[in-house]
Image (cartoon, helix red, strand yellow):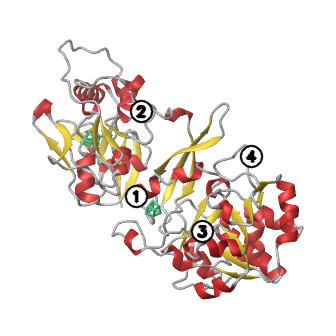
Amino acid sequence: MLTINVDNKDIEVNEGALLIDVMLKNGISVPHFCYHEALGPDGNCRMCMVEIEGQKRPQIACDTIVKDGMIVRTKGEKIEKVKRGILELELINHPIDCPICDQAGECKLQEYYMEVGLYESRLDTPKVKAKKHVHLGSEVMLDQERCVLCKRCVRFTQIYTKTDDLIVEKRSDKSVISTFPGRKFENPYAGNVVDICPVGALTDRDFRFKKRVWFLSHGKGICMECSRGCNIRVGHDKAKYQDDIIYRFKPRRNDQVNGFFICDHGRYSYKKENDNRLFHPLLNGKELELQDGIDSLKGLIKKDALVIIGASLSLEEIAYIKAWANKEGIKVASLVEDYIDESFEDKLLKTKERASNINALKLLDIKNLSKDLLKECKNIILFEHDITKDLTKEEIKEKKIINFTTHAANSELFEFNFPVASTYEKRGSYINCDWILQKSEKIVQKELQPPTIIEVLSILLDEYMDEDKVWREYLNGSQTLKEINISLIRDDGYKLGVKNG
Ligand code: SF4
Ligand code: SF4
Ligand code: FES
């Protein structure tokens, strides 16, 4: 370990560390545009200047390796004047259109201006005009005038996706970000360039102008679209006269799962959460009040039924469904093959398992059912499983099916549809493809909030149960989970000591 001193504070650092990393990790403000932890230094924006004792001129922190005894200053008249000058250059051709910019509220240019800018413009020459609405491809929109040419977006396609989709076109103050002539930026990870763009040059066509970001609240969730279980920030808001609605998913950094990024499929899957929700029980197409629905359930659930458990339910839900079914003498199974999609997998994040908790089904020994056996069952209880992948509409209608579901899709096919809380309306844990146990919080509260599966089943069993009690009574007993206190699991998850269920 070495010791450096930044603004009169001694910091222990590893040999070979980058000065900017040390400063960011220690909460020391260092304005920067081109440097990004996932992409490394590029040294083109010069925004991260610091004073280093013994050096004649200010140095960029993103390209400086720490040395033992190094003394660094980020404050003081001299270095602040340098940073102000660089920011002035960055803003020479910037349109300063923050009031109509979708990035306002989470823009680094705004933040740094408030931190080290704060001067009157000294320029009276006309600004260079460029294009304002360039659709690069996917959902990515470019405003060329707002770009600070940090090249993060270009380097993302070079370093991360290795597809080289974006380039800097032309020279000097005519330079703009572009695709190769005749090509579109069609990339399954394209949305990440909007996140890493430090200013409002790249915006998301899907989100822009829908909501000012300061109205959004964000919760910590897990993507349900494949077994990677990428960590996401769920942006939602309950506006006046509206229900609580999810507006966007953003990546949440987790170095052992998804790093800084997510795929576009997962990013835009938030739409499914809002659309076509089921809020009332439906018995043969007739809407019931919740209490009447629960009373009807008691009469409709038969001992010879078969329970099918969906592969994106939480670990707590799967454990409690199994416990409830055992008490009622009902068999449980899953249909894991329905979730395998080889075409979805890639070498970055996407896996072929199109559900978030297949490993929880394995861990809790929920057996996979063959489709032939499924066809023989007359009474089926579905917990968040899309049975239309296994049976034709005619076959479904011939059976007595109770469908515990978040959404109303295909509700006309089932005898009874019972509404339950959706993923971000409950808390729960998930085991990803690498056996990392992760938590997702309750984020959204609907006006007509359907109960969680655990709440419904505990009413049927006439006992009190919640997620913590499920851990104590049904999960901590297992060899793999016995030492775990779920409330103490950190945000980046916990690697379980299992290899194969
Ligand atoms: S579009 Fe954004 S990320 Fe790309 S170079 Fe310009 S400012 Fe940087
Ligand atoms: S890789 Fe999988 S878990 Fe990650 S965002 Fe995409 S679909 Fe979701
Ligand atoms: S962040 Fe250091 S030069 Fe751009």
Q: Could you tell me the amino acid type at mark 4?
A: Leu
**Tag 1–tag 2 contact (CB < 8 Å):** no
Instruction: From the image, state whether disc 1 or disc 3 is nearer to you.
Output: 3
- Dot 3 alpha-carbon crowd within 10 angstroms: few under 14, some 14 to 19, many 20 or more: some
Q: Which residue is mark 2?
A: 102
The Cα–Cα distance between marks 3 and 4, rounded to whole angstroms, is 23 Å
Q: Of helix, strand and loop, which one carries label 4?
A: loop
Q: Considering depth in this image, is 303 or 136 the residue closer to the camera?
A: 303
Mark 4 → mark 2, Cα distance in angstroms: 31 Å
150 or 295: nearer the viewer = 295
Q: Which residue is mark 3?
A: 386
Q: Answer left or right for 370 relative to 298.
A: left
Instruction: Please report contact status of discs 3 and 4: CB closer than 8 Å, yes or no.
Output: no
- Amino acid tagged 1: Cys
Residue 357 spot, x, y in % from top left: 57, 71
Quadrant holding the C terminus: bottom right
Vertical side of 426 occupied by 79: above or below: above
